[in-house]
Image: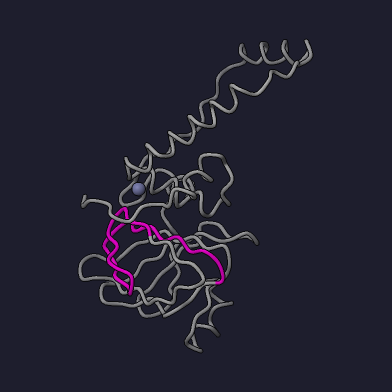
């Protein structure tokens, strides 16, 4: 794998470590952290800091019933959580979001495909597959967009993004990502609000595709 050059900003890693990120962003951060030792170390440092805070908080007494209830549970049969391993280009957290199944791709035209993993009022997270040489329609953002490359690479006005790289785009950025030659560029993209497309036709199609 090529070296990762675009990382998750520290503030987002801190929010992730303390459980304060919306689900859509958490998935992108978890997927990047599973590929990036640097960001994993930073998350662990934030978690350790959280542990120190917990240690310094005074103990809260609990009832005898709660205590004996917890001890009883220790004897209950252990049901392991399913563990999702990396599959193909998809890191474990993405496989988990896919519930272990392959993505259900839908065509957006021009060879671009997407598979929505989760969408609600707080945001959405999707896989995008962009054929080499193809541009994602020029768009700007109502909120924050995180894009993690899982396969191939793309380039836009701000630089080049290859496997493991994350682009952080905010309201001020208008960009046209273009997939580079090679395999289709597969990305995991999270937004907290619908994208705004500048061209009329994508804007008309937007409600249909929920992009
Ligand atoms: Zn990183």
Residue 52 magenta: no
Q: Residue at x 65, y 24 (%)?
A: 57
Residue 3's place in the image compared with 168, above or below, is above
Residue 142's place in the image compared with 192, above or below, is below
Q: Is residue 160 left or right of residue 141?
A: left
User: In front here: 121 or 174?
Assistant: 174
User: In front here: 165 or 15?
Assistant: 15
**Residue 204 location, quadrant:** bottom right
Q: Which residues are magenta?
A: 142-166
Image x and y of residue 179, in percent? 29, 71
User: In front here: 37 or 124?
Assistant: 37
User: In front here: 48 or 33?
Assistant: 48
Q: Residue at x 48, y 36 (%)?
A: 46
User: Seen from this angle, which residue lies furthest bottom?
Assistant: 200
Image x and y of residue 78, in percent? 55, 19
Residue 192's place in the image compared with 102, above or below, is below
Image x and y of residue 153, in percent? 27, 64
Residue 116's place in the image compared with 63, above or below, is below
User: Seen from this angle, which residue lies furthest front?
Assistant: 56
Describe the colour scheme in one phrase. Answer: one colour
Q: Residue at x 37, y 46 (%)?
A: 91
**Residue 35 location, quadrant:** top left
Numbered circles on residues, count: 0
Image x and y of residue 34, in percent? 37, 42
**Residue 160 location, quadrant:** bottom left
Q: Is residue 26 left or right of residue 150?
A: right
Residue 161 magenta: yes
């Amino acid at each position: 794998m090529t070296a990762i050059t675009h990382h998750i900003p520290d503030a987002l890693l801190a929010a992730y470590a303390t459980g304060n990120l919306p689900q859509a962003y958490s998935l992108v951060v978890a997927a990047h952290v599973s590929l990036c030792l640097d960001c994993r170390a930073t998350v662990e440092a934030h978690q350790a800091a959280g542990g120190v805070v917990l240690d310094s908080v005074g103990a809260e007494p609990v009832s005898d019933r709660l205590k004996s209830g917890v001890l009883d549970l220790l004897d209950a049969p252990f049901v392991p959580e399913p563990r999702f391993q990396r599959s193909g280009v998809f890191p474990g957290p993405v496989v988990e979001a896919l519930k272990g199944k392959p993505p259900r791709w839908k065509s957006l035209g021009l060879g671009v495909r997407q598979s929505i993993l989760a969408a609600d009022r707080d945001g959405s997270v999707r896989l995008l597959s962009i054929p080499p040489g193809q541009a994602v329609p020029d768009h700007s953002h109502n909120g924050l967009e995180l894009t993690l490359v899982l396969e191939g690479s793309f380039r836009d006005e701000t630089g080049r993004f290859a496997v493991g790289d994350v682009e952080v785009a905010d309201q001020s950025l208008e960009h046209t990502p273009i997939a580079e030659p090679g395999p289709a560029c597969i990305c995991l993209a999270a937004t907290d609000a619908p994208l705004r497309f500048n061209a009329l036709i994508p804007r008309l199609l937007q409600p249909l595709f929920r992009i």
